[in-house]
Image (cartoon, rainbow, N blue to C red):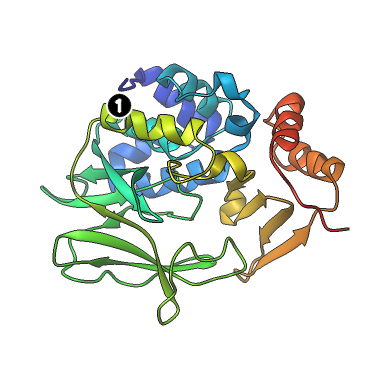
Amino acid sequence: MAGNLSLSEATQFLEGVLQMHSPMESLARDRVSFLRDLMAAFLSKIPFQSVTAIATPKPERRGLTFQEIKVDMVTQKGGLCFEMNSFMKALLEKLGFEVYHVGCTINGKPNNHLSTVVKNLSRPGDLHLVDVGCGHPMFEPIPLDFDKESPLYKSNYLVHKFVKDADDSFRWMHKSYQDYDGSTGRVVDGWYMFLQFKLEFRDIEFFALHMENIHTVESGPEALAHFLVQLKATDFRNGKLFAITGTSTLEEDASGKVNKKRISSPQELEEAYKFHFPQFPAETIQQAIQTVNLKFEK
């Protein structure tokens, strides 16, 4: 189900949805700078979210078609990694980039995250990781041609780096920062592994069963992820994190500190979604809130 966009669809998305100014001229002038601007604009406008997946009635849950993904991107509803990164691959390919998918392991579950790699960006043969579907701020393409360890990156609240192991696998390491989601793995010397991958390029069809699982299996040992029981929406408006996760809002301030505010009732949570993420229909928000188990603190 590899997706395709027309050039007019790609241009309309860049200009109309992401509100990028003269994107084709920018692309012609400097591919790396354009890609950096595209990633930042995408993360600011398109949320990483589980709302629509949770709101889908259980008998109707499944992996989305590319046409459905395209609608969700154009209407700024966003989605999970499969939707976000597969759309980005189709968009970049239409713009002349050479792009591949790689499977990633999060929390010990292989291929439960789909990411993208751009080849020949700056020079022949180079490889850059481009991931706009993980809920964290990757505002620039990450070069993967380092020997053992990448430079240290600081993207707002997130301090991170990449480590290459002897088996040629890569680990994306995050500095532990409990004010956001907390670490997803064992913390060693203040760092934890967010995800791991090898540069094994895969067709989109390779991920079909994995993404079907993520959209249909809520919990238990068979579940590859737990997004169907974790209500959240995250974007990086104005270059800063804003998220509603569970029964809290998280908002990054100018200093990079993430401030958490508790939500005390389903009504307040519904209003928060309506105000901060108005692209979601009211009935979608209501259905999602009613479907998951949420604990509110008075």
Determine the image quadrant of residue 116: top left
Q: Position of residue 31 (x, y in %)?
A: 29, 44
Identify the residue at horizontal 73%, vertical 43% (top origin): 276
- Considering every residue shown, the one lying at the far bottom of the view is 189
Identify the residue at horizontal 47%, vertical 48% (top origin): 40
243 relative to 64, above or below: below
Q: Is residue 183 left or right of residue 246?
A: left
- Comparing 105 with 123, the one in front is 105
Identify the residue at horizontal 43%, vertical 54% (top origin): 139
102 relative to 151, above or below: above
Identify the residue at horizontal 47%, vertical 45% (top origin): 225
Determine the image quadrant of residue 9: top left
What number of labels is visible? 1
Q: Position of residue 44 (x, y in %)?
A: 55, 45
- Considering every residue shown, the one lying at the far left of the view is 124
Determine the image quadrant of residue 240: bottom right
- Comparing 39 with 228, the one in front is 228
- Note whether residue 195 is visible: yes
Type of residue at label 1? Lys
Q: Is residue 111 left or right of residue 221?
A: left
Q: Position of residue 278 (x, y in %)?
A: 72, 33
Quadrant in which the N terminus is drawn: top left
Per the image, the residue denoted by label 1 is 94
Quadrant in which the C terminus is drawn: bottom right
